[in-house]
């Protein structure tokens, strides 16, 4: 019969056929047998316990109403099942229990007739047993049906014991985001798409297939078919496989009868999942979305820190204009710079902002901020701090004292702080420290000397490096060749006492410049400028005639 | 949709609208894609651990002579006035202005060279202060370029292409890595306020096809470093805020309608301008700098618009997390009268450059700030025009010239590469030559960026700062 009906459903064509309408009557019709059966049970109990002995005639009518309407409900249900996508874990037991219930109610109606309005006690007992067995099947069937319609926990969610569950139903959550929802790319881009197209069935309320898409965590956790996101190979995630599956194929999401995702929406979900599905990941999306070639192909790695740390913390940091950036791709370590809000944030605000990311801070710049010795206690507890910049802050010896033996600190900038000689010993206890800057601090020359002597391999910069000194002066220029070369500089010109034999330049005919003289064939010849000797040497024969012999 | 609309609907806009819809601005803010105004840029984080977090580029425009500054060639003095030997020139083409000269008399530096410091680098007497910090420098003597004229050559250094229109290096960095200070632009430009033959165009710090919020913001020399920074009389900051918020809503409506990404850029710029109303007066107010600092940078540093003043300002901007600070100092174009011209240029820049190194270093900033000094090409070893007793000029020379880098993971106290004896060609161009693309690739490497992976697709092809070339010169990296 089921086969027949699904074949009918297929041949019936579009989703708006009468057939579909018949199926959709199911939620309406099913209340008739429930009401009738419950009424029968109440009356039966009253006759039994309270000795109510009225006519049993209406029992027969009611019983037949229950039986007929039960079968109508079952048929509508089967049609509905054939047209929609329901979680078989809920739908199949619901179907079987409902059929069982209908059979028992029908048999009960027969038994009631056979009891001749209650006059035959044996048959009356059979009727009673069948009636209550029917009810016993009806209650779980009803529960499963309600779960499919309204989602798990619909009823019990409002019981006093479950008060912590956020009060929302699917239609309300479409309109307004919970205030504490995950932020970042997920809440701004992905969640609105899911709300519009998926959450009606896969929300916290419905959880069809035990899957809720309402938060990053629940998506990761997945449903009955396993995690929706594959953290090792995001591209193979189930959620992507399902939305990319052929529309005609079984399991395509959203179901064929529901509003489909737009291509751009699929691209968004793709990009988000492939970037690691972190609440905040998604810088790739700007370039890598609809275009086949991502602008930055290497950004597919997620930022593990972002995945682990609460998004609210990142949002708070960003809102406070604190710069946060993983030190490199795929690293949990963060570079944090308080340059923008340095003057504005109080010490407590700074520490509050840093607290959630304390385990991931690598480079921390607190220059010109209001950090003090007190706050240094928290900073010193950052387990992976590598470079700490405290330039132009009020931090002094008490603060530096807290950095003693810091396990990972390599670079420390104490320029223009209140640090004095009392800090030298504390600084020297930091095992990995390789560079420390103390210019403009309170260190005296003695303290500085002690710091420099204290630890091998520690670079101490106090801004007192001398300028590089001259180590060699240019050699005096010696002209090449035996004779003074043409165009020699004044200092290297031919001796002044050697008077040129000519009075005007043989090349140009201009007056001589004593700086440019050459010795040619044992005679001193003068020129007007440095260019003429070269011309002369190029072709001495040409100019020879112009030299007085 | 009108046809123009479809034409104008670039990929970026397509993506933006497809992805963000109405929440675009909020999204950019949250993920920090709006790198110019804080955030992590499009890369999210550097590809690998960076040595430098920011760059100060001291661009000496006009083409400083390497032969009067860092490339010591005594033979040019020994052979002063002799023609450039053919064995050196090797038949290579000359640049236009001296190409027709019948004589190419070689000429050496009239200024003495000394060796300085532990690195024993040769530096001319014109740069005594730079010589004092020579152990911090990585002097590259084997830079070369293809461009032989100023504009293409400067454009090449600033944008990685000789043709105008590509994004500048600062814009690439702002786009890729974002800014560490959301209250200041990621890319600030400081041009020395002086008359020069070669004008400096705003496109040298332009954004090309990248979203326009990434372009450099020029701080001017006058009373207002950024024009119209103050609210007009009667407008309070609150009123301005409300005004901007209302305007943003209208802009957002228009964006939703047209999908034009430049509307988002406009919004980002207006927001940045609002923030700069507070941050720029603070950063440009040098009154709190102690006397000692002005002494270090020289007297010029008290005068807004000078190179020394800009060096000091660059340090303040670097301290506050600005990603890319570009100084431009024009006037090095000594085609003639070099001996009377170059000492002045050196005087204008020597103390400021050196002071910047010293000041960054003692503050612990030189570790992660890459400083680059250099021009767009070098100058010939022969005299352009007449070589006289005490005057000569030098023409443009792209085949070799000297620049230096300091800090930010560049090697300390080394001179990279050798030019030939006459200072005309690079000895071993294959192993020691540093092309403009190579410099860019190396700078990006120091910033933790793989130059082949910072890409923007525009008009159907992928663009990079280094186009299809460039290799990281590992010898320059500490």
Image (cartoon, coloured by chain):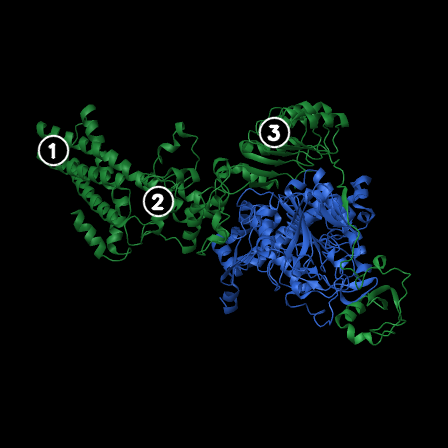
**Chain that is blue in the image:** B
What residue did someone put label 2 on? A238
**Does residue A389 lie above or below B299 as drawn?**
above
Q: Residue at x 39, y 43 (%)?
A: A233
Label 1 element class: loop
Disc 1 target residue: A117
- Camera-nearest residue between B459 and B348: B348
- Hue used for the chain lettered A: green
- Secondary structure beneath label 3: helix
Say above or below: B430 vs A347.
Answer: below
Q: Disc 3: which chain?
A: A
Inter-mark Cα distance, 3 to 2: 42 Å
Q: Mark 1 falls within which chain?
A: A
Disc number for residue A470: none
Give the mark nearer the N terminus: 2 vs 1.
Answer: 1
Confirm or deny contact between disc 2 and disc 1 (CB under 8 A).
no
Q: Position of residue B126 (x, y in %)?
A: 79, 52
**Dot 2 crowding, Cα within 10 Å, few <14, some 14–19, many 20+:** some
Chain of the residue where label 2 is placed in the rendered structure: A
Residue A499 place in picture, x, y as percent: 90, 65
**Of residues A324 and A317, which is closer to you in this image?**
A324
Residue A294, how many percent across, how many down? 47, 53
- Residue designated by label 3: A379
- Residue B458 position, x and y percent, is 52, 61
- Whether tag 3 and tag 1 are in contact, CB under 8 A, the answer is no
| Quadrant of res B199 | bottom right
Q: Is residue B305 visible?
A: no
Query: Which SS class for mark 2?
Result: helix
């Amino acid at each position: 019969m089921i086969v027949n009906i699904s074949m009918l459903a297929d041949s019936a064509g579009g989703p708006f056929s009468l057939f579909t309408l018949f199926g959709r009557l199911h939620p309406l019709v099913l209340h008739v047998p429930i009401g009738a059966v419950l009424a029968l049970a109440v009356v039966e109990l009253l006759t039994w316990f309270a000795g109510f002995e009225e006519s049993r005639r209406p029992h027969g009518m009611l019983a037949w109403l229950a039986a007929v309407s039960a079968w109508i409900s079952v048929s509508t249900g089967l049609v509905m099942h054939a047209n929609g996508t329901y979680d078989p874990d809920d739908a199949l037991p619901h179907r079987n229990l409902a059929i069982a219930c209908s059979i028992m109610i029908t048999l009960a109606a027969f038994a009631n007739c056979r009891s001749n309005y209650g006059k035959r006690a044996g048959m009356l007992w059979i009727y009673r047993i069948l009636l209550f067995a029917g009810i016993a099947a009806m209650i779980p069937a009803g529960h499963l049906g309600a779960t499919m319609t309204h989602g798990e926990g619909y009823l019990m969610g409002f019981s006093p014991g479950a008060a912590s569950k956020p009060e929302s139903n699917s239609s309300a959550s479409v309109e307004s985001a919970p205030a504490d929802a995950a932020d970042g790319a997920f809440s701004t881009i992905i969640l609105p798409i899911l709300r519009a197209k998926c959450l009606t069935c896969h929300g916290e309320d419905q959880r069809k297939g035990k899957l809720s898409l309402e938060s990053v965590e629940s998506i990761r956790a997945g449903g009955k078919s396993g995690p929706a996101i594959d953290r090792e190979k995001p591209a193979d995630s189930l959620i992507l496989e399902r939305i990319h599956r052929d529309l005609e194929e079984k399991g395509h999401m959203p179901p064929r009868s529901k509003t489909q995702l737009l291509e751009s929406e699929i691209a968004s979900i793709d990009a988000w999942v492939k970037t690691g599905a972190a609440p905040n990941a998604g810088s790739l999306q700007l370039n890598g979305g609809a275009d086949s070639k991502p602008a930055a192909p290497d950004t597919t790695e997620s930022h593990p820190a972002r995945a682990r740390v609460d998004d609210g913390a990142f949002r708070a940091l960003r809102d406070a204009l604190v710069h946060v950036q993983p030190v490199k791709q795929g690293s949990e370590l963060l570079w944090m710079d308080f340059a923008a809000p340095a003057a504005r944030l109080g010490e407590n605000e700074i520490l509050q902002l840093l607290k959630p990311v304390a385990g991931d801070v690598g480079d921390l710049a607190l220059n010109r901020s209001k950090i003090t010795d007190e706050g240094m206690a928290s900073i010193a507890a950052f387990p992976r701090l590598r470079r700490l910049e405290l330039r132009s802050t009020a931090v002094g010896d008490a603060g530096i004292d807290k950095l003693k033996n810091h396990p990972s600190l390599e670079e420390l900038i104490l320029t223009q702080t209140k640090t004095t000689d009392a800090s030298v010993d504390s600084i020297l206890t930091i095992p990995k420290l390789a560079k420390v800057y103390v210019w403009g601090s309170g260190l005296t020359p003695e303290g500085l000397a002690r710091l420099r002597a204290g630890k091998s391999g520690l670079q101490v910069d106090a801004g007192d490096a001398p300028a590089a000194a001259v180590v060699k002066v240019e050699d005096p220029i010696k002209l090449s060749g035996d004779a003074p070369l043409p165009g020699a500089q004044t200092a290297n010109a031919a001796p002044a006492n050697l008077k040129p034999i000519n009075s005007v330049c043989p090349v140009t005919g201009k007056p001589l410049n004593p700086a440019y003289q050459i010795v040619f064939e044992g005679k001193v010849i003068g020129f007007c400028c440095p260019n003429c000797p070269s011309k002369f040497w190029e072709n001495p024969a040409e100019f020879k005639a112009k030299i007085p012999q | 949709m009108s046809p123009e609309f479809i034409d104008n609907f670039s990929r970026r806009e397509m993506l933006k609208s497809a992805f963000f819809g109405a929440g675009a601005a909020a999204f950019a803010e949250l993920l920090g894609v709006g790198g110019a105004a804080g955030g992590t840029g499009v890369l999210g984080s550097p590809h690998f651990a960076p040595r430098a977090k920011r760059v100060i580029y001291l661009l000496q425009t006009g083409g400083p002579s390497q032969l009067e500054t860092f490339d010591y060639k005594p033979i040019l003095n020994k052979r002063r006035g002799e023609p450039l030997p053919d064995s050196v020139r090797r038949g290579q083409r000359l640049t236009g202005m001296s190409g027709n000269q019948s004589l190419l008399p070689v000429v050496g530096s009239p200024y003495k060279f000394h060796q300085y410091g532990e690195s024993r680098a040769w530096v001319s007497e014109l740069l005594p202060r730079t010589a004092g910090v020579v152990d911090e420098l990585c002097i590259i003597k084997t830079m070369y370029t293809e461009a032989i004229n100023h504009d293409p050559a400067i454009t090449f250094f600033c944008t990685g292409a000789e043709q105008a229109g590509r994004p500048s290096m600062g814009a690439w960095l702002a786009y890729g890595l974002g800014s560490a200070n959301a209250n200041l632009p990621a890319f600030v430009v400081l041009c020395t306020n002086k008359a020069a033959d070669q004008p400096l165009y705003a496109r040298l710090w332009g954004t090309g096809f990248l979203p326009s919020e990434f372009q450099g913001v020029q701080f001017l020399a006058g009373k207002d470093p950024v024009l119209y920074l103050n609210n007009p009389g009667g407008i309070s900051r609150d009123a301005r805020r409300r005004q901007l918020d209302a305007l943003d809503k209208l802009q957002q409506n228009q964006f939703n309608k047209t999908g034009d990404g430049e509307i988002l850029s406009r919004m980002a710029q207006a927001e940045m301008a609002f923030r700069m109303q507070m941050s720029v007066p603070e950063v440009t107010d040098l009154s709190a700098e102690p006397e000692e600092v002005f002494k270090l940078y020289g007297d010029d540093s008290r005068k807004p618009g000078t190179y020394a003043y800009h060096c000091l300002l660059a340090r303040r901007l670097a301290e506050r997390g600005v990603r890319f600070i570009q100084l431009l100092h024009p006037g090095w174009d000594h085609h003639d009268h070099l001996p009377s011209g170059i000492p002045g240029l050196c005087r204008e820049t020597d103390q400021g450059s050196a002071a910047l190194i010293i000041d960054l270093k003692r503050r612990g900033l030189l570790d992660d700030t890459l400083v680059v000094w250099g021009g767009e090409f070098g100058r010939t070893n022969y005299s352009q025009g007449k070589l006289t007793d005490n005057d000569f000029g030098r023409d443009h020379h792209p085949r070799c010239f000297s620049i230096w880098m300091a800090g930010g993971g560049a090697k300390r106290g080394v001179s990279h590469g050798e030019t030939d004896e006459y200072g005309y060609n690079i000895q071993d161009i294959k192993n020691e030559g540093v092309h403009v693309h190579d410099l860019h690739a190396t700078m990006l490497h120091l910033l933790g960026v793989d130059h082949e992976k910072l890409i923007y697709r525009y008009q159907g092809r992928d663009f990079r700062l280094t186009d299809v070339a460039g290799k990281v010169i590992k010898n320059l990296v500490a």
